[in-house]
Image (spheres, rainbow, N blue to C red):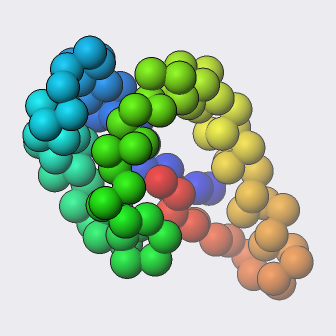
Amino acid sequence: MILIEDCSPEFFSFWEQAQGLDLTQQLDLWQTLYQAPHQDVFALYYSRWGHPDKLPAALQRFVHSAPIIQAALPLVKQRAAHIPPTLCPLLNIAEWVPPFV
């Protein structure tokens, strides 16, 4: 069993509305439509890996990367579901329900 918090619907809703807008408008929509509904995810992300200052550059890449993300999403979900059954025997535990975002 695996718990997947799928943030992609909000991401794609954001991108559908933000595409072609100026940077200020995109940043506002990012905050409202994507980051605010997933505050816990972004708090963790910004504390360990990412930095909000890198968002403007990322927004410029979304025109190319958003379709790639959308195409890869089913495979990512499928592969993530196989992780617990593979790791449980290695860790000598009966069941593990890891969170994935």
Which quarter of the figure has residue 41? bottom left
Against 94, residue 55 (above or below) is: above
In this rendering, position of residue 47 left or right of residue 84: left
Against 58, residue 41 (above or below) is: below
Which quarter of the figure has residue 78? top right
Q: From the top left corner, tell me how far across and down residue 28 is, in percent.
A: 11, 40
Name the residue nearer the viewer: 11 or 95: 11
Name the residue nearer the viewer: 82 or 59: 59
Q: From the top left corner, tell me how far across and down residue 70 is, in percent.
A: 53, 24
Q: State the residue at coordinates (83%, 84%).
A: 92
Name the residue nearer the viewer: 62 or 5: 62
Q: State the residue at coordinates (29%, 34%).
A: 10
In this rendering, position of residue 7 left or right of residue 13: right
Q: In this figure, what is the number of numbered marks?
A: 0
Name the residue nearer the viewer: 97 or 7: 7
Quarter of the image with the N terminus in it:
bottom right
Q: Is residue 9 visible?
A: no
Q: Is residue 75 visible?
A: yes
Q: From the top left corner, tell me how far across and down residue 96 is, in percent.
A: 64, 71
In this rendering, position of residue 64 left or right of residue 7: right
Q: State the residue at coordinates (43%, 65%).
A: 50
In this rendering, position of residue 2 left or right of residue 44: right
Q: State the residue at coordinates (46%, 77%).
A: 48
Q: Residue furthest bottom?
A: 92
